[in-house]
Image: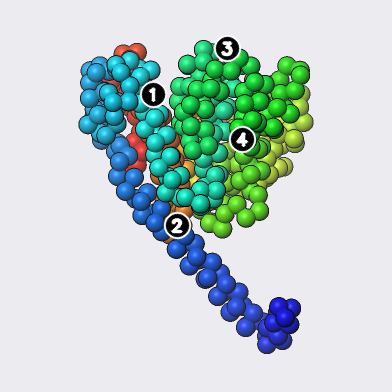
Amino acid sequence: MAGGSAQNLTEMGPGVVDRVALLQVTKERVEQMAGWSDVIARVAGLKTRLLSADQLRAMARSRDLAGLADGLEQAGFPVRVTVMGTSPAALDLAVRRQAGTAFRVLGRWCGSRADELAVIFEDEDRRSLRILLRGLFQGVAPVTRLSGLIPTPSLPERALEELAAQQNARDLAGLLTIWGSPFGEPLLQELGPAQPDLFRVELQLDRTWATRAQRAGVSRDRAMRDFARTSIDFINVRSALLLALQGTDVDVDDMFLSGGGHLRANQFRLAALAGGVEATLEMLVRGMAASSFADVLRMHGDLSTLEEALLVEHISHFGRLARREPTSLAPVLTYVLRLRKQVIDLRRLIWGIALDVPRPTLLRDVVGVGS
């Protein structure tokens, strides 16, 4: 019967088929709007709790950590309720817990739809795992490995603490596997019995996330698909620059992750083999020329500042999309990215004040999360 209906539509002419297709797209759009309108409205409320640039600059003028703790309390961060004392580590923990609470609330609001936001939560998880593994490889103390990590519904604070306490990377990957994390088994396969290469291990995290982000039906939302594509572009940019900086005997083509929005495989290869950071950046700018991120690459040749600069542009990118498509998931993505940037800014203030960095320097370095 269904086949006969399709045949009848075809016989009625392409105009009817086009109108039916348009009605189907409209129906999906209505379903999408109805499916996320409550979460988008609640996220609008959460956005008002993010610190403004003026608030961050006021905190940057704090005379000491006690003054900064007062500023955080007044801004709604339960510093003295969450932790005792005003050490930089305690304030750092309070900031991370506040961000983790926001993620947990967001996941709870989504309810059964939380799987569709797994791309966002798992993106934060892969960043946390990258930091934890790097700390393991470098012999950093377990408590220090936790610095900067944001708990998520899939890797809450207790899970991150347990992972940070592991003595080797295979034990960490084994725990993830036991917990059913999508990163566990791929990491175990990459680590193997031989001495693992950190670059390959980090790339395995990225590849696992990218594969899951692109899987069929992960989201009907254009903003979420855009987030996956641009994030994959950033991964490839970072990989090309690392290859240019340290070199490697691996197959460059194997380092490229497909699914990005702008950078193509041949452009990645040319950039990675360009013979120096400046030449690599030039090739990457060409590959990303059709995006707003090309200007960021032109201005930031240092990998240590590039990732944060790309994050700032990512926020602007989805902020513009949220204004054009307010019923898409763009407002949610903008909020999550701004939350990540806020953690970076506050940690910079905490440790800058703890180390008595000149206040003019802190004021210059602090960039607000926007509006």
Q: CA distance from mark 2 to mark 1?
A: 31 Å
**Residue count near mark 1 (Cα–Cα under 10 Å), binned few <14, some 14–19, many ≥20:** many
Whether label 3 touches label 1, CB < 8 Å:
no
Please say if 353 is above or below 203: above
Q: Secondary structure at mark 4?
A: loop
| Residue hosting label 3 | 139
What residue do we see at 51% from left, 52% from top?
113
Q: Earlier in the sequence, mark 1 or mark 4?
A: 1
**Residue count near mark 3 (Cα–Cα under 10 Å), binned few <14, some 14–19, many ≥20:** few
Q: Which amino acid is tagged 4?
A: Ser
Which circle marks residue 36 in the picture?
2
Q: Secondary structure at mark 2?
A: helix
| Residue hosting label 1 | 93
Rendering quarter of residue 73: top left
Q: Earlier in the sequence, mark 4 or mark 2?
A: 2
Q: CA distance from mark 2 to mark 3?
A: 44 Å
Which circle marks residue 181 in the picture?
4
Can you say which quadrant of the picture contains the N terminus? bottom right
Q: CA distance from mark 3 to mark 4?
A: 24 Å
